[in-house]
Amino acid sequence: MAPSFGGLQLTPFSSGGRKTLPEDDAGDLEDVRLLDAYKEDDSGLEEGMRGIQVRVTGMTCAACSNSVEGALRDVNGVLRASVALLQNRADVVFDPKLVGEEDIKNAIEDAGFDAEIVSEPSRTKPHGTLLGQFTIGGMTCAVCVNSVEGILRKLPGVKRAVVALATSLGEVEYDPTIISKDDIVNAIEDAGFEASFVQSSEQDKIILGVTGISNEMDALILEGILTSIRGVRQFLFDRTLGELEVLFDPEVISSRSLVDGIEGGSNAKFKLHVKNPYTRMTSKDLEESSNMFRLFTSSLFLSIPVFLIRVVCPHIPLVDSLLLLRCGPFLMGDWLKWALVSLVQFVIGKRFYIAAGRALRNGSANMDVLVALGTSASYFYSVCALLYGAVTGFWSPTYFEASAMLITFVLLGKYLESLAKGKTSDAIKKLVELAPATALLLVKDKGGRFIEEREIDAMLIQPGDVLKVLPGTKVPADGIVMWGSSYVNESMVTGESAPVSKEVNSPVIGGTMNLYGALHIQATKVGSNAVLSQIISLVETAQMSKAPIQKFADFVASIFVPTVVAMSLLTLLGWYVSGTLGAYPKQWLPENGNYFVFALMFAISVVVIACPCALGLATPTAVMVATGVGANNGVLIKGGDALERAQKVKYVVFDKTGTLTQGKATVTTAKVFTGMDHGEFLTLVASAEASSEHPLAVAIVEYARHFHFFEEPSTTKDAQDHSRETRFSGWLLDVSEFSALPGRGVQCFIKGKRVLVGNRKLLTESGVTIPTDVENFLVNLEESAKTGVLVAYDDTAVGVLGVADPLKREAAVVVEGLLKMGVIPVMVTGDNWRTARAVAKEVGIQDVRAEVMPAGKAEVIHSFQKDGSIVAMVGDGINDSPALAAADVGMAIGAGTDIAIEAADYVLMRSNLEDVITAIDLSRKTFSRIRLNYVFAMAYNVIAIPIAAGVFFPWLGIKLPPWAAGACMALSSVSVVCSSLLLRRYKKPRLTTILEITVE
């Protein structure tokens, strides 16, 4: 969101003019890499629908999130609404023709919670539109908001506009080719309001940490430097935090030029570094925990004297005599307890009343209602007892300590809970820490020669920058190697500890570790486009999602508090009525007590011991931890629903090529059946296949080149993309009338004679007879799990090539492991039946489906789903995407295509089949933990509430005072969170242990 500048002076400056800078273009360096398809936009929504995120504050348990969801779904035009309690965020999909963002925000606020539309300045809207934020002053009510929104929406070029009264901000999506920021500001001012531009999706705001400023003179120097820099719009320097917030025009100056200008203007006295937004978010989390700890310690400091006055002081004669001194109508001890507890109840405990009031205004109830009800009953009864004693002279016992200690224990629980919940996001924190803080930029002169090395902040890297990566340092950005060779540890993405060789034109990923040689890389993807940023975004999305099992907790939470209140009233009536009827002896009553007071303490204990939070936290905390654990183990999970479905998988359908096999075809056999020379045969075949991009064609050409020049066949991407003119000139034959025949092979003419290279179908349809010896040789190849390629020249079959795609080393063990887990593996492929059966036999798969077209793979998935079975599909290519989408659980190989990754529910970043086992095993362990959490939460309430109600008191003498009941309630929710945190100890199965896994 845009920053709040409340009460602090922003200094505006004119840019003095504009010039248009060329946009950075990394398109020529584009490389198909992991997760490139994940760019957050609205393209995945239903046509005409829009999606937004809203930050919701004031929620404390599942009942609150249910209340917000219910309020949103009641709004006409809202298609879907999902609320994440732990993140205090709501995802809403709506029809902009029927409802606006402000209506959604108002619906949440009417439900008793605070709402704020979440903007994402780094997101560029489609079709060249920008998302801009503007401060709007002078608004006092909703009428003003509607007025500004109406004006903005009528402006030409404005696609969408929403205004927030609480933050005095307006968010406008506009086309910069039709309308400018200044035009929008002028339109708002013409309507009688104050307006100024804040920031836009052009990323024209930067927050910098500044060191070197020690006095007021330094601050004035900094202001002078900023004033003189062309393009700076506004700035704000916080001396306390050492933070400089600058709004600038990216059309005039870049963020790196801005930093260079400030450091250069100060003669390097000031040192600046970019503040990482995730680090700032972590600071806010720590601030929240610190605030809760401060409340707890303050309550404890005030509650301990109250507890001592009640329990300890009566046994110390001198102190007791002082407390028994009468001061006005009350004793000195009563005055002290009343004053101290009033501070705890209404100052420290004010937050409970506020939250309870919001819930009740919306017609719902949450844990805050129970706390407010229980503590208020204890407090106001004690006050009434004092006043009654002062009037009548009959002094009943007071229970001020119950109210104070109850609030103290609840705050302790909240503090421990905030610490524990903070640990559930450790995965994202670790991912953020992978990125290096700085980078070495190589500066060129006008002639293109490198003349200088500069250390810059890694967040200031721009596409096209050439960076130096020293041995033992991290790669600062995604890019391409321009010079040097080395080995890079990419385990943070692939999970493989074995270093990967990197040479010129090899792609590198930001955050990976360069081990040996120095490299020069050209940055291609930075910021939100980088692989690491996309992984973080995917993990965040998964942690925001809600698993279907959460619906049970939501239902229980919706009726929990009313049920508890009803049980408390029954407890009060039961003990009071039975006491007045003489059902139990008066000896059970406290000193100077009566039946009502006796019954009231049981009723209060029932209210405060019940814990709906434990139920509400059972699922989301476990899902958050599991998605983080999965990311750390090379398995990206896209949502809680996918995580839940994976535990029930009955069938795992594997694609063959690139999934069970390595996807690197190599020629293993070349046999000539005529008098043609072997070298001439290979030249003929290579000449025909040289114009094809098929993987088998590439393998055949590489094999022929190796035969002629004794070069090692290259399987690297840069070798495959090398200039064909260089690779093939001088030894290949001239080809004419080349045509590729999908599903069959290729056809061309060489020296005026037709050449056919492909399968049986190609030769048969072309009228070429396949001799018996050729057919027998071909059958032998297929039965040995190789693909046979027939070659015909001048309508005569002249030879056969055998092409093999080696199996992945772990394929057979993973298949056996799945069988041990009770999961049935299936192989589906477009290859012929003999080859398919041979491969399946080698890995141990019994169920094989061969010669299946891409659309047919989805039909295979549906055939397994007919009996209600949960089916997982593992694939890597574009042709697998229909099946991945059709499967209940789609698992995409991380090295596969973007389309396959987008269609899947899981991304196996390491491209290792072991992670199929990991995904299913992690899902099972996660939901075992969730079920354990639910059992604990339900058992706690089922056992604790009767104990608090005094059900066992007549026989066992067990009686919980309200403060002890509050302690139990606080610790129960903490226990559930800590139980979920145990998932962080998850260890993924290895090849040596997979076979030991059994059905749970």
Image: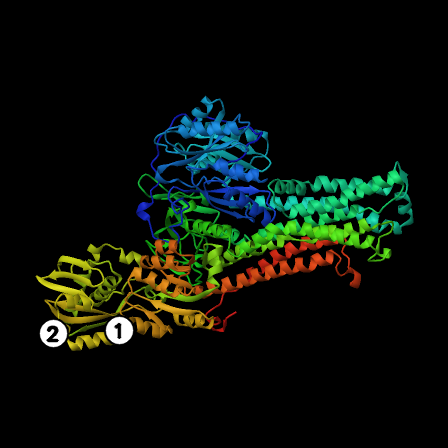
User: Can residue 808 be seen at all in this image of the molecule?
Assistant: no
994 displayed left or right of 6:
left
Camera-nearest residue between 495 and 126:
126
- State the residue at coordinates (44%, 72%): 819
Structural crowding at the residue carrying mark 2, measured as other residues with C-alpha within 10 Å and reported as few (<14), some (14–19) or many (≥20): few
* Residue closest to the eye, 183 or 848: 848
Mark 1, residue position: 782
Residue sitting nearer the eye, 660 or 370: 370
Q: Is residue 271 above or below residue 30?
A: above
Q: Is residue 523 above or below residue 794?
A: above
The residue furthest front is 581
Q: Give x and y (percent) for residue 112.
A: 59, 40
Q: Which colour scheme appears in the figure?
A: rainbow
Q: Are marks 1 and 2 in contact (CB under 8 Å)?
A: no
Residue 574 visible (yes or no): yes
From the viewer's perspective, is the residue at label 1 or at label 2 nearer? 1
Residue 944 image position (x, y, % from top left) = 70, 58
- Residue plotted at (45% across, 39% down): 121
Using the image, tell me which numbered label, if any, was put on residue 666: none
Q: Name the residue tied to disc 2.
A: 675
Could you tell which of marks 1 and 2 lies nearer the N-terminus?
Answer: 2
Secondary structure of the residue carrying numbered label 1: helix
Three-letter amino acid code of the residue under disc 2? Gly
Residue 867 image position (x, y, % from top left): 41, 66
Query: Of the residues shown, which amino acid type is indicated by label 1?
Result: Glu
Residue 255 horizontal/vertical position (percent): 44, 37
